[in-house]
Every structure is written in structure tokens, then in C-alpha cells.
Amino acid sequence: MYDLICKTSTVLPEDVAFAVKKALAREEKGSIAKTTLDIILQSIALSSERGLPICQDTGTVLAIIEGRPSKSVFRLEEQIKDAIKKLTKKGILRQNCVCPLTEKNTRTNTGMHVPQIHFEPVDGPTRISIMLKGGGSENMSTQYSLPHSKLQAGRDMEGVRRCVLDAVFQAQGKGCAPGILGVCIGGDRASGYFIAKKQLFRKLNDKNPSPLLATLEQTILKEANGLGIGPMGLGGKTTLLGVKIGYAGRHPACYFVTVSYSCWATRRYVVELTEKGDIKKWI
């Protein structure tokens, strides 16, 4: 767990780094956008080479444990918390947990419901998914209830498109653009946010198994990048690096569109464990 969380904080996933490189090639020579993306790429390389956090905001830890139910699962929870405390003391993770009752920082990155650890029973090998999501990008996450009169958004895919693009427009580069969007259509207010955030674990070059959603993802990505917001909101051709959309059954009276906004430093890794608890492979 220590190795998994440490790598998540210091080494940007290959697909995300590659997307930033592609974005750099698209921007105009001498533009602020090109300079910004070049600085980001230099920072990515330095973090990896020196084992330093990719961003000064090392985010909030989300852990998803998938596997057969057993007593060993409870040990994983203990090991994740222990690793977080050690990495916080070392400086690989920032002290990002504040108690809202006392307004005091716990200094260990752990506290009430922190880290978020979700257990999902699966008939297969144990897999651990870790995501570190910064506060700035989390502030830009949002949820819409359709129909939405101001956006002229009805309860259909066109309404979904209008909501997601509005979320990008409202962010205006905040949350450290270029961003990656995880979206959930449907669900309730709570499940919508979780399912939207889980979409951020998808590789940027994957294809949605739903042809309808695959088309919608590409449409929103193209239109968002045509807004001219650009890296850090300073203008340019790259406002988003990717859009990933999932869905959940909804109550007939409710139609939610939930957007989980992630910054360019989308830090997430998944590992499969051996029966002894060692890392068998990186997913």
C-alpha cells in the first residue's frame, strides 16, 4: 500500500502524460498555452525522476478494494491508513485532513471518513484502486437536476450535453485545466458523485462500450476544447484532456447529471495483489 500510494502521488499515469504531450503539439507556437503545457511536462518529469509529489496539493485519498470477502480485507484498510500516515510524515502526501468541528488539521491525513475506503465484493483476485484528487478540482465538481430551464436542458442526451459543457464553462480554467471529466447520468445525488468519480479511473484512450455514450464523450470533448478556455484558463485549444461518462438507474422523478472534475494531474493507479498481499501487477 505504501508503494501504491507513493507512486500515485509522484508518477503521473502514462496515458495522462501522453495526453498532455498531444495537447502541447496542438497549441500555437509561442502561445501561453504551449508554454504552460511545456512547464507542466517538465514538472511531470521532475516529479517522477526525484520521487516528489506531482502537485503541492496531494489531494484526498480514495481507495476502492475489490475482491472476495475475507478477514484479510480488514487488514488492507489498516495498511492503507498506516501507509498514508507514513507518507504524510515523509512529505509525499500533504496534511490535507481538517476536522470541521474543531477546524484543526489532524496532521496525519486521516480522520472521520478519511481516507474514503470502499469495499466491493468480486469473485476474483484482489484489486486496489487509489486516486488522489485535489481540492481545487473537487471544488469544480457539480451536479445538475433535469429539466434545467436556464440551460434549456431537458431529460435527454442533449440536456446532458448542455449540463456538462456548462460545468466546463463555469469552471473557466479553475481546478487546474486542462481537466478530465468523470460524468454520471442518473443515480441519486450520492451515488451520482461516486460513479462519476469512478469514471476517472478509465484510461483516456479507452472506448465506452455504449456507442451512444462513446459518441457523446467525443462530442463534449471536441466542443469543450472549442471554447478557447485553455490550460489554466489562459486561452488555447486544450480545455479538456478527456471525458468519461457512466450511468445508473434513476428514480422516475429524478434525472441527475453529475460531473466530477479532475485536474490535469489526474493521479490514479490500480494494482492486483497476490494471495500474500504483494503487488502482482499494475493494471
Image (cartoon, helix red, strand yellow):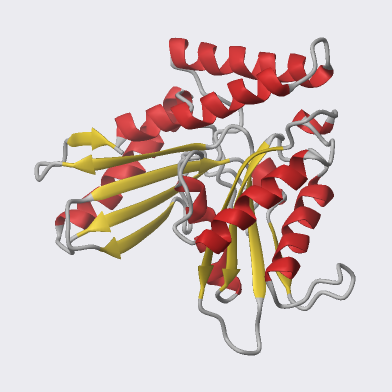
Residue in the image at 56% along x and 39% along y: 59
- Residue 100 visible in the current orientation: no
Residue nearer the viewer, 55 or 112? 55
- Which residue is the extreme one toward the bottom? 252
Q: Where is residue 159 in the image (x, y as percent from the top left)?
A: 75, 69
Residue in the image at 76% along x and 49% along y: 168
Q: How many labels does the image show?
A: 0
> On the rendered structure, is 23 left or right of 201?
right
Residue in the image at 60% along x and 40% along y: 134
User: From the image, which quarter does the C terminus lie in?
Assistant: top left
Residue in the image at 68% along x and 14% along y: 39
- Which residue is the extreme one toward the right? 150
Q: Is residue 186 above or below residue 176?
A: below
Residue nearer the viewer, 59 or 101? 59
> On the rendered structure, is 101 left or right of 17?
right
- Residue 189 visible in the current orientation: yes
Q: Position of residue 215 (x, y in %)?
A: 60, 55
Q: Where is residue 46 in the image (x, y as percent from the top left)?
A: 53, 11
Q: In this view, does 149 lie above or below 55?
A: below
Q: Is residue 24 above or below residue 199?
A: above
User: From the image, which quarter does the N terminus lie in?
Assistant: top left
